[in-house]
Amino acid sequence: MNLLNYTLKYLSIALLLVISIWALLFYLNMIDEVHDSLDDGLENNKMLVIQRVAKDLGTITRSGFSEHNYYITQIPEHKGITFKDLYQDTLMYTLNEQDYEPFRMLTTVFDQDGKYYQMKVVASTVEEDDLVRNLLYSMIGLYVVILISVLLINNLLLRKAWTPFYQLLNRLKTFRLDQDDHIQTPHTKVREFNELNEVVSALIDHSVVTYNSQKQFIENAAHELQTPIAISMNRLELLAETEGLSDDQLESIGRVIDALQRFSKLNKSLLLLSKIENRQYGDTALISINSLVDQVIYDLSDFTEMKSLQVNVTATDILKVDMNRDLALIMLSNLFKNAITHNQAGGTIEISIDKTSLSFSNTGGAEELDAKRIFKRFQKESKQKSSTGLGLAIVKAVADLYDFKVSYRYDGQHNFSIRFPTKISNVD
Amino acid sequence: MKLLVVEDEADLLDVIRQSLEKEKYIVETAGSYAEAMHKIISFEYDCILLDIMLPDGNGLDVLAELKAARKSDNVIIISAKDSLEDKITGLNMGADDYLVKPFHIAELNARINSVLRRKSLDGNQTLELADMYINLSDRVVTVDGKELLLNRKEYDILVYLAVNSSRLVNKTALAEQVWGDYMDQADDYEFMYSQIRNLRKKLKDHAPRIEIQAVYGVGYKLIAT
């Protein structure tokens, strides 16, 4: 439920309540006013009739509802003295409606020449059930009109008023910490939205600064580490050449050199990842994935031969992708290397290329790998201690850089595929 | 042969100097940009190892100065930066090679050797060890006048070890030289070991004066007797 409908929901309930209460009060007020006005009229009538009676006693005998709107009867004195004027609603038969209709009736007593007379004066009044019905229809009409107005106002005015909010929201949806330096906020006259914009901008600027300094730190740290590694490694190599070292000592030195080697490799891989994520591989060209695959297969043929792997390439089309050549090579060789490393001796690697995608299928362990974790950093499935665990993370980083989709699935073989966006892969 | 090593990290400078002296080079050092500038203007070197990130200046300016002065000194850049742009920039400015830190001593030797060999005007593309001749341009090895047949990898390994003869070559350095950066899995070494086994067998049969010694855990050493 969006904001507009949300407010509308509560508004409609509140309006129904308010209008109902209003209608009830209005009705009571109106009836009161009608009675008031009728009663005034009846009072006036009463006085006119009494004046007439004073002039002409015959008026009393001529009275009656059939001809006049008053009716006079004589009553005993004891009743007359204590009687007080009484207004009440009553029903009388009317000829035009041929039905009993509501009337307002005043019952009063007056004395004339020492005799007491009771007089009833009537006036036609409103039909209350008609009034209620009419009022109900009007109320429903009013309610509908108000609801439609609110809906229109909401849609036109509120939508306009909330525009800066939705603009900000859309901008935030597309914001990427690793790609954007700041956020352009829409201009607005509304104070709350201005505050929101300022707060969001400040938050984002702060995050970007923090993110960049972290990236910078990783890159600098990785660079600075290379020198002490170089010193240690070269010193150890010199040390290993010293005459008279025992085999055990040499082996220890060799192990330390190996460890430093891994350290350096890890460092380089992290640096590479950081560079890819920093978009430091600028210039792109239209790369033929088909020929690059052939090159990688050739470059790594020693490794495939050593494991007696059968490599098959099925290309149904020429796949050309606009990307950095080095990164393309890194991506393909990492995927191919992965397919070799996790393969069994005598296994197969199937590479298929079509117009928009590339996939590597290799035989290997009979267990499906965790597709969610496999492209994460330092996810090592292999027991090989020298593997950095960054190969597929680098593949993912390259893919992310260019909006390629990498995926893994297991169907007896381990299948890694890259889907290229059609808009750039179909260019010839 | 006289070399100049320009490196601000004293420890690394010392290690490189020690190693190069083992190769019988005359080694001079410069620990700063100012010192390097002073030395290149005053003296001639066969090869300069140049760190480009110096605290008081950019090593590339040293290179530019050398080229401006039309000096024929060969330059190998040694740098912690391994991006392609950095390499291209250095090589375009006239450096002969670009070596990324950290590097193996054997690798440094091989690079210096290759640069110096290219420098010799007579195009002396041969390596001579005892009775073995390696013709580097034709990739042919002869022992006592007879050709020794080697496959591509065996030849690469032999040349790398021969360039570093009598020095202990780390197995990773050897693997990286022959297989490039693809070498990153432990089981990849198995392939290298089998190539070296074959090479040692061929040398034992046809070149008894050349021996590849295995130093367990570290690497290999080629000895000519």
Image: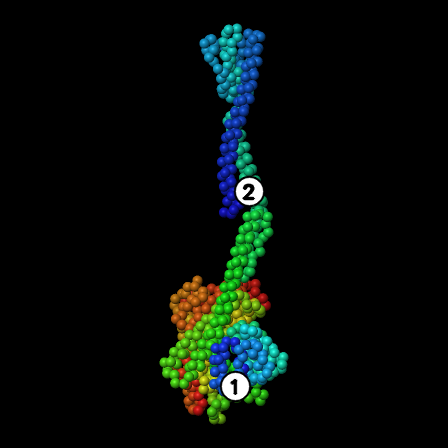
Residue under circle 2? A151
Which quadrant of the figure has residue A241?
bottom left
Task: Name which residue lies at 56% across and 18% down.
Answer: A41
Could you tell me which chain the residue with mark 1 belongs to?
B
x 52%, y 68%: residue: A275
Q: Amino acid at mark 2?
A: Leu
* B214, A370: nearer the viewer: B214
Q: Is residue B28 above or below residue A215?
A: below
Question: Toward the viewer: A272 or A136?
Answer: A272
The number of numbered badges drawn on the structure is: 2
Which color mode does the image show? rainbow
Which amino acid, by three-letter code, is at mark 1?
Ile
Mark 2 or mark 1, whichever is nearer to me:
1
How many residues crowd around disc 1 within 10 Å: few (fewer than 14), some, or many (20 or more)?
A: some
Residue B170, above or below A418? below
Q: Secondary structure at mark 1?
A: strand
Which type of secondary structure does the marked residue at label 2 adopt?
helix
Using the numbered discs, state the Cα–Cα distance from disc 2 to disc 1 in whole angstroms: 91 Å
For the residue carrying disc 2, how many other residues have a C-alpha within 10 Å: few (<14), some (14-19), or many (20+)?
some
Q: Same chain for marks 2 and 1?
A: no
Residue identified by numbered label 1: B26
Percent across and percent down for residue A397 are: 50, 66
Residue B92: percent from the left, percent from the top?
Answer: 59, 76
